[in-house]
Amino acid sequence: MSRERVRALKARFREQGYRLTPQRMALIGLLSVSERHPSAAGLHEEIKEQFPTTSLATVYKTLAVLKQLGEVLELEFSQQDNRYDGRKPYPHPHLICTRCRKIVDADVNLGQIVEAAVTDLAGYRISSRRFDFYGLCPECQSRA
Amino acid sequence: MSRERVRALKARFREQGYRLTPQRMALIGLLSVSERHPSAAGLHEEIKEQFPTTSLATVYKTLAVLKQLGEVLELEFSQQDNRYDGRKPYPHPHLICTRCRKIVDADVNLGQIVEAAVTDLAGYRISSRRFDFYGLCPECQSRA
DNA sequence: TTACATGCAAATAGTTTGCCGCCAA
DNA sequence: TTGGCGGCAAACTATTTGCATGTAA
């Protein structure tokens, strides 16, 4: 539940010696609620509704802190905004619409399926993984 | 075998009405051989050994053609160079070292394992997928 | 011959950084 | 009180684009 997630994130900030500024609390609140895997720019737009002077740089800097704490999952893209998940900061599969760029969680536990196979694969120490599915969401299919 | 791959790629260029310039043939040759998932800049460096005047823009433009033909797999990253695979242009899992950035193919057929589950997942029409594993390669582990 | 490709340079865009003033602890 | 933080602007970097020249077919 998002209220708990907010509390947990604030606690982690405090215990790691990071200051809890209004901007950071706002970002934590948004990330704890959003299921839409927002971009930094999107988060910035939302935060400005509460704190109009907030800069995009601050959003990026706070996301960097959260990444370092392992409290946000970053989905990298090369020519589009990266997308962030603060509700489920651990690797999990997504459904990514190649048209509208909507990202939702895939309801299939691929992690467990291949867990045994990937913990020590070819001598690698696996620390993270990325299972993404690209395709058209139902809405875009009907628009086509 | 890479000689066949070269032939196939040249044929596809011709049949699609694309010209086979020396630069393009060099790039096709490199992509058909390289198992290291090179970056555009890396390919540019290699091509310049054969054709010193070749520009990076031409490399990108030719990669764009190959992408459109579905003859190269592009692995996107946000703050590092994208990486390309012209030998196996279809989705397949990789092992990506988070330290040295080396990328090798993962010898596990995840695609087949979850094939049935993902062809029509949550109403999406899946067209592509990305299964990447991040971690330390054996070399980097021993250096740590 | 001529439409398409090359190569240069400039533009683009997401992200990061430097610096100074400010405020959370 | 004070060292970390926010905000602004500039820097950075991978990639894309525009255009004049060159060349594959």
Image: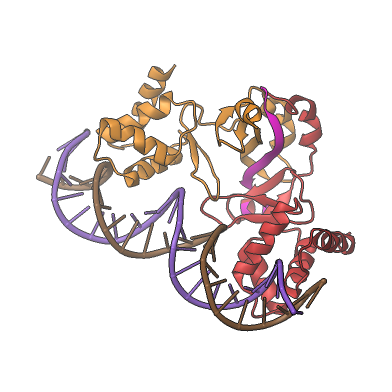
Chain colours: A orange, B red, C purple, D brown
How far from the left and from the top, in percent, is residue A109?
A: 67, 24
How far from the left and from the top, in percent, is residue D2?
A: 16, 47
For the point 72% across and 57% down, which residue is it?
B66
> Over which residues does the magenta segment extend?
B122-140
Q: Is residue A17 magenta?
A: no
How far from the left and from the top, in percent, is residue B50?
A: 73, 78
For the point 79% across and 26% down, which residue is it?
B116
Q: Nearer the viewer, residue A86 or A127?
A: A86
Q: Nearer the viewer, residue B10 or B34?
A: B10
Question: Quadrant of the rendered structure where residue A54 is?
Answer: top left
For the point 49% across and 25% down, which residue is it?
A35
Question: Quadrant of the rendered structure where residue A2 is?
Answer: top left
Q: Which quarter of the image is occupied by the N terminus of chain B?
A: bottom right
Q: Main secondary structure of the magenta part?
A: strand
**Relative height, residue B15 to residue A126 (above, below):** below
Query: Can residue A46 be seen at all in this image of the molecule?
Result: yes
How far from the left and from the top, in percent, is residue D14?
A: 55, 59
Question: Quadrant of the rendered structure where residue D1 is?
Answer: top left
